[in-house]
Amino acid sequence: MYRRYQTNPTIDDDICGYETYPFEVLTDVTCDDLGTGVWTMTDNPVGGSGQVRDTLMGMYYVKVDLCGYYEFTYTVWNGGVCEGTHTIGMTFHEQPNPTIEGSANVFACATDVYTTTDGRECTLDDELTWTWDLDPELGELTNNGDGTASIEWYADAVDETTTLSVEVCIDVPQGVILECCASAEFEIEVGSPTLAGQVKYWNEFETYMPTPLSNRISTEHTPCRLLLRGTVRWYLLR
């Protein structure tokens, strides 16, 4: 005589955050007396604790206080020879908590690099992915794939205020479907390049300089480089 217990298979995976969604325990009964079910934590990371709680609607959920792998065993015993157990295991990941660092005041026709920092207090060997977003009319955004992004600002971005955003997600290598993402935003003001700031272009082989003027007459972006002679003339006439 025995009892077999099964749980919703989605609970035996990776969990985003420190609490699962409700799941149920299914039973095959071969005992005359149903007995009483008890949950026990049978494996946990060092320093971590958790428990299975009853929703009072025939469902359960797990809540822990630290990231890592946990196991919980459900045992039913009717006081006699009829006993059954089932163990579930899951890895809890703390949700990403990104912030963006970089310059909030930039110059058109310059290139700036922005970095994400992770504010999580508990991390595993998580692989992260970063999805950056910027108004494509203002600059060319390059995702460097290491938590940083480079922006080459167009001349058309002068006097614009824009928002750079990033979505950071945990990429679970086992192929488990896990949505564990968080986003951050960063406001940026774009100003006109100064003559002093662009002297570095004078010594380039083709002696080009960026122009702060926007004269776009088509869908193409205003070129950031004109012949030095024309640019110097603009500065002298300011």
Image (spheres, grey):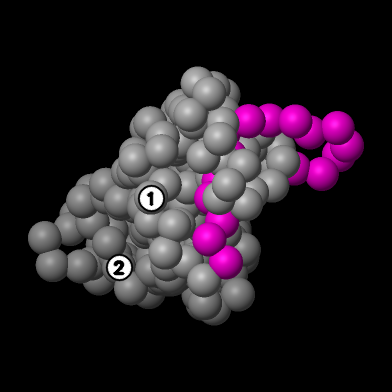
Q: Amino acid at mark 2?
A: Leu
How far apart are the two marked residues, 1 and 2, measured between alpha carbons?
47 Å
Residue count near mark 1 (Cα–Cα under 10 Å), binned few <14, some 14–19, many ≥20: few
In the displayed structure, would residue 192 be above or below residue 208? above
Determine which of the numbered discs, if any, sits on residue 199 in the image.
1
Task: Give residue 228's position: percent from left, percent from top.
Answer: 55, 50
In the displayed structure, would residue 63 be above or below residue 82? above
In the displayed structure, would residue 202 be above or below residue 221? below
Relative to 232, is 72 on the left or the right?
Answer: left
The residue lying at 86 percent from left, 39 percent from top is: 219
Does the magenta-highlighted stretch encompass residue 218?
yes
Q: Looking at the rendering, which quadrant does residue 35 occupy?
A: bottom left
Residue count near mark 2 (Cα–Cα under 10 Å), binned few <14, some 14–19, many ≥20: few
Near-viewer residue (85 or 64): 64
Identify the residue under disc 2: 124
Q: Secondary structure at mark 2?
A: loop
Which span of residues is magenta-colored?
Answer: 206-221
Does the magenta-highlighted stretch encompass residue 196?
no
Task: Give residue 229's position: percent from left, percent from top.
Answer: 58, 47
Near-viewer residue (176 or 48): 176
- On the question of residue 10 being in view, the answer is yes
Q: Taken as a whole, is the magenta stretch helix, strand or loop?
A: loop
Relative to 94, is 33 on the left or the right?
Answer: right
Q: Secondary structure at mark 1?
A: helix
Task: Give residue 227's position: percent from left, percent from top.
Answer: 62, 52
Residue found at the very far right of the displayed protein:
218
Q: Amino acid at mark 1?
A: Val
